[in-house]
Amino acid sequence: MSSAEVKNDSGERVVQIRRCACVVKGGRRFSFAALVVTGDGHGRVGYGYGKAIEVPLAVDKATKQSNRSQMSVAVVGTTIPHQVIGEFRSSRVLLLPAKPGTGIIAGDCVRSVVEAVGITDILTKAYGSTNPLNLVKATMEALKKLRTREQIERLRGVSL
């Protein structure tokens, strides 16, 4: 039941490990669920959720899923191009661009996603539910909505 983040050299961050107990005739049978965020630090990020009877197996499953689900994110320098809100169920995450030197102002779950992308200057605020899985998904939704100035010019067929 820890929400502590563990960082590895490969760019994977274990955001949360949950323990579930099933009561059977001989006692309790435990199973574990792991929430993992992976990124290359250069605009790509993904998350995965894996369940198994041992922690390392759950983390491996989640890591494989997060590597498969990686997506590209629009990053301008060390921050994001514009303000955006991401929603998933009852969690909402507000992401604001920040000036260089500000750092990452975010909670644990949002911080792990933002660091995995490679953003170093950002302001964030989480509203509603603070369930780690929902916060990670809301942050991913927000990052998915980001567009650079060049992308918008290309979509509209005009120069801004």
Image: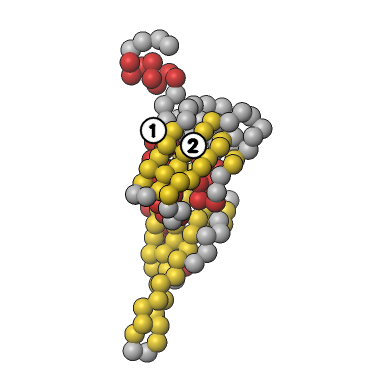
Can you give x and y, in whole percent of width and height, for residue 127 in the image?
A: 45, 46
Outermost residue on the bottom side: it is 26
Q: Please name which of the two marks, 2 or 1, marks the residue nearer to the observer.
A: 2
Q: How did the renderer colour the structure?
A: secondary structure
Q: What amino acid type should be assigned to the residue bearing mark 2?
A: Leu
Front residue of 30 and 64: 30
**Which residue is at a point 58% across and 31% down the rendered structure image?**
98
Q: Which mark is residue 145?
A: 1
Can you give x and y, in whole percent of width and height, for residue 70 in the image?
A: 40, 43
In this rendering, would 90 be left or right of 124? left
Outermost residue on the right side: it is 101
Image quarter of residue 148? top left
Does residue 63 appear anywhere in the picture? no
**Which residue is at a point 39% across and 36% down the rendered structure image?**
144
SS state under label 2: strand
27, above or below 149, in the image: below
**Which residue is at a point 33% across and 19% down the rendered structure image?**
155
Q: What amino acid type should be assigned to the residue bearing mark 1?
A: Lys
Of callouts 2 and 1, which one flags the residue occurring earlier in the amino acid sequence?
2
